[in-house]
Image: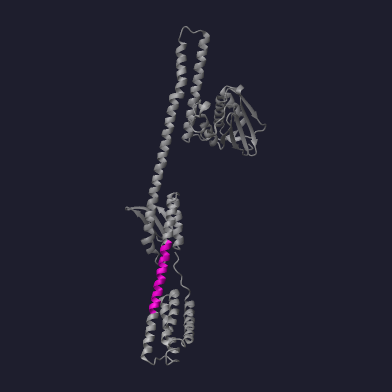
C-alpha cells in the first residue's frame, strides 16, 4: 500500500515562510483584542499544518522561525531580537515548547494514519486472497491472482506464489508459507524492497496467507474426495443397473432359446414345428446379440473410449444401412432430400445411433410405419425419426436419454439402453439429439449436425 506521500521540500519551505508571515500579520490584527503574549497560539496553528504535511523536522524549524518572528515583530522591544522583561522570556519559551510538542503530536498522528492505511490495505489483501483461493477456482489459479494483488498492494514490479518449497536467488527473496512444519507454497519477490516492506511481509502478510492457503488446500482436497465419492456412486449405480439388465433382459432370450432347444429334441414334432422352433432360437439369439452389443457400446461411452473416426460420410447411405440392419424395411419410410451435404463423422457410430432410433420408434409405434426425414436447414443437417405411438409424456422427456431408464405405460419395453447410446454417439460426433412429442400424437426424435465444408479431394 502506498504510504502517505509528503509534498516536495521546496513547497514545504515556501509554505513555512508564507504561513509564518500570515500568522505575523494576523497577530497584528488581533493585538487590539488580546494581549500579545496570548496570541502566540496563532503561530502554533501554522506549526501543526507544516508538521502534518512535512514532518516533525519541518515543524520544529517552523516553530523556531515563528519564535523569531514573534520576538522581532511583537515582543517588546520590537524591531530587534531582544526581550525586555522576564515574563516575555517565559512566554516565548512556552511558545517554543508548545510548538515543538505540537510538531511531535502531528508527526505521530501522521505515522498512525499511515500505519492504519497499511493495515487496511493488508486486510483488503487478505480478504481478496480468501475470495480467490476459497471461492471455487483452483489453488494454482488462485495463487497467481493473489501474487498479482500482492505486487500491486506493495508497489512491487513482480511477485510469484508457487506451490511447494522454492529457493530464492540473487534477484529474488523467498518467503515460505508453512503449516505444521510443511512448506505449502513460496512467495517470491524482488531482492530490492522498499523500506519497511520486508517487515510487513514477514510479520503480517505471510502469516495471513499461510492460514488462507492451508484452508484452500484442505477445501480442494475435500472437493476431490466428494467428486471421487460421487463418481464411485455413479459407477455403483451403473453396475446395479447392468446387473438388473443382465438378470432380466438377458435371461428372457436365453430362457426362450433353452426352451426351444429342448423342444427340438422331441420326436413328436413335425417339420413345421421344428422350423418354427428353429426360427425362434435364431430370433432370440439375434435379440441377445443386439442387447450385448448395446451393453458394450454403453460401456465404451461411459469409459470415454468411443472416440469417433471422422470421415466424410453420406447420411443417406447411413440411414439406408440402419434401416436394413433392422430387417423391417417395409415399416420404415426414408424421405431424403436431394443433394444432402456430407458430414464429417464416424459412419459406424451414426449407423448404430439411427438404427437404435428406428428400433425404438418401431417398438413404441403400435405397429404403425415409421417415417425418417433428412434435409439441410441452413447450416445444419436435420434428421427426424417420427412414430405414431402414444408419445412421450412431458415429465419423462428430460430423462429418456438416461441409461436404463424405462418410461411409464407402453414405453416400458426394451432395455433402456438404445436412446442413451444414441445420445452418446451423436454428441461424440458433434451433433445434438432431442425429442418432440405431444400426448397421443406420437414422438419425433430430432438429430442435428452442423454442416462443414467438405474437402475438395
Colour scheme in the image?
A: one colour
Work out whether residue 337 or residue 343 is closer to the camera in this orientation and state it.
337
Residue range in magenta is 100-121
The residue positioned farthest toward the right in the image shown:
338
Magenta stretch: dominant secondary structure: helix
Q: Quadrant of residue 61?
A: bottom left
Residue 401 horizontal/vertical position (percent) = 52, 33
Work out whether residue 223 or residue 180 is closer to the camera in this orientation and state it.
223
Work out whether residue 146 or residue 390 is closer to the camera in this orientation and state it.
390
Whether 145 is among the magenta residues is no
- Residue 385 vs 215, above or below: the answer is above
Residue 170 horizontal/vertical position (percent) = 40, 61
Whether 110 is among the magenta residues is yes
User: Is any atom of residue 166 visible in this view?
Assistant: no
Work out whether residue 119 or residue 257 is closer to the camera in this orientation and state it.
119
- Number of numbered discs on residues: 0
The residue positioned farthest toward the front in the image shown:
33
Q: Quadrant of residue 40?
A: bottom left
Q: Is residue 211 left or right of residue 317?
A: left
Q: Is residue 132 left or right of residue 181?
A: right
- Residue 38 vs 341, above or below: the answer is below
Residue 101 horizontal/vertical position (percent) = 38, 78
Image quadrant in which the C terminus is located: top right
Residue in view at x 47 percent, y 34 percent = 302
Residue in view at x 39 percent, y 48 percent = 219
Residue in view at x 45 percent, y 58 percent = 149
- Residue 125 vs 300, above or below: the answer is below
Q: Quadrant of residue 123?
A: bottom left
Amino acid at each position: 500500500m502506498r504510504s502517505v506521500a509528503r509534498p516536495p521540500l521546496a513547497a514545504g519551505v515556501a509554505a513555512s515562510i508564507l504561513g509564518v508571515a500570515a500568522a505575523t500579520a494576523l497577530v497584528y490584527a488581533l493585538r487590539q483584542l488580546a494581549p500579545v503574549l496570548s496570541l502566540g497560539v496563532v503561530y502554533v496553528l501554522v506549526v501543526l499544518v507544516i508538521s502534518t504535511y512535512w514532518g516533525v523536522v519541518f515543524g520544529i524549524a517552523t516553530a523556531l522561525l515563528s519564535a523569531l518572528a514573534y520576538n522581532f515583530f511583537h515582543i517588546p522591544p520590537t524591531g530587534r531580537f531582544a526581550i525586555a522583561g522576564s515574563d516575555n522570556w517565559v512566554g516565548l519559551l512556552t511558545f517554543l515548547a508548545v510548538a515543538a510538542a505540537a510538531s511531535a503530536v502531528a508527526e505521530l498522528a501522521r505515522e498512525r494514519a499511515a500505519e492504519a492505511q497499511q493495515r487496511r490495505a493488508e486486510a483488503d489483501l487478505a480478504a481478496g486472497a480468501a475470495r480467490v483461493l476459497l471461492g471455487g477456482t483452483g489453488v494454482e489459479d488462485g495463487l497467481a491472482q493473489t501474487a498479482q494483488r500482492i505486487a500491486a498492494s506493495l508497489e512491487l514490479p513482480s511477485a510469484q506464489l508457487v506451490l511447494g518449497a522454492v529457493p530464492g536467488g540473487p534477484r529474488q527473496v523467498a518467503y515460505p508459507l508453512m503449516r505444521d512444519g510443511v512448506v505449502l507454497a513460496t512467495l517470491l519477490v524482488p531482492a530490492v524492497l522498499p523500506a519497511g516492506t520486508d517487515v510487513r511481509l514477514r510479520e503480517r502478510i505471510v502469516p495471513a496467507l499461510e492460514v488462507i492457503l492451508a484452508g484452500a488446500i484442505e477445501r480442494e482436497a475435500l472437493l476431490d474426495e466428494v467428486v471421487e465419492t460421487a463418481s464411485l456412486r455413479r459407477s455403483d449405480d451403473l453396475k446395479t443397473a447392468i446387473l438388473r439388465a443382465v438378470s432380466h433382459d438377458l435371461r428372457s432370450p436365453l430362457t426362450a432359446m433353452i426352451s426351444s432347444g429342448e423342444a427340438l429334441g422331441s420326436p413328436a414334432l413335425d417339420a413345421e414345428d421344428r422350423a418354427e422352433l428353429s426360427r425362434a432360437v435364431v430370433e432370440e439369439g439375434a435379440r441377445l446379440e443386439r442387447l450385448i452389443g448395446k451393453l458394450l457400446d454403453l460401456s465404451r461411452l461411459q469409459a470415454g473410449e468411443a472416440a469417433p473416426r471422422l470421415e466424410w460420410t453420406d447420411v443417406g447411405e447411413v440411414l439406408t444401412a440402419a434401416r436394413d440392419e433392422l430387417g423391417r424395411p417395409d415399416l420404415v419410410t426414408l424421405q431424403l432430400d436431394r443433394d444432402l451435404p456430407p458430414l464429417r463423422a464416424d459412419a459406424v457410430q451414426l449407423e448404430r445411433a439411427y438404427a437404435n432410433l428406428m428400433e425404438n420408434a418401431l417398438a413404441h409405434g403400435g405397429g404403425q410405419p415409421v417415417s425418417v426425414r433428412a434435409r439441410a436447414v441452413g447450416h445444419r443437417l436435420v434428421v427426424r425419426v417420427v412414430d405414431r405411438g402414444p408419445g412421450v409424456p412431458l415429465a419423462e422427456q428430460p430423462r429418456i436419454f438416461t441409461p436404463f431408464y424405462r418410461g411409464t405405460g407402453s414405453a416400458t419395453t426394451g432395455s433402456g439402453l438404445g436412446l442413451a447410446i444414441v445420445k452418446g454417439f451423436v454428441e461424440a460426433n458433434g451433433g445434438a439429439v432431442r425429442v418432440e412429442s405431444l400426448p397421443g400424437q406420437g414422438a419425433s426424435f430430432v438429430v442435428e449436425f452442423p454442416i462443414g465444408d467438405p474437402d475438395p479431394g
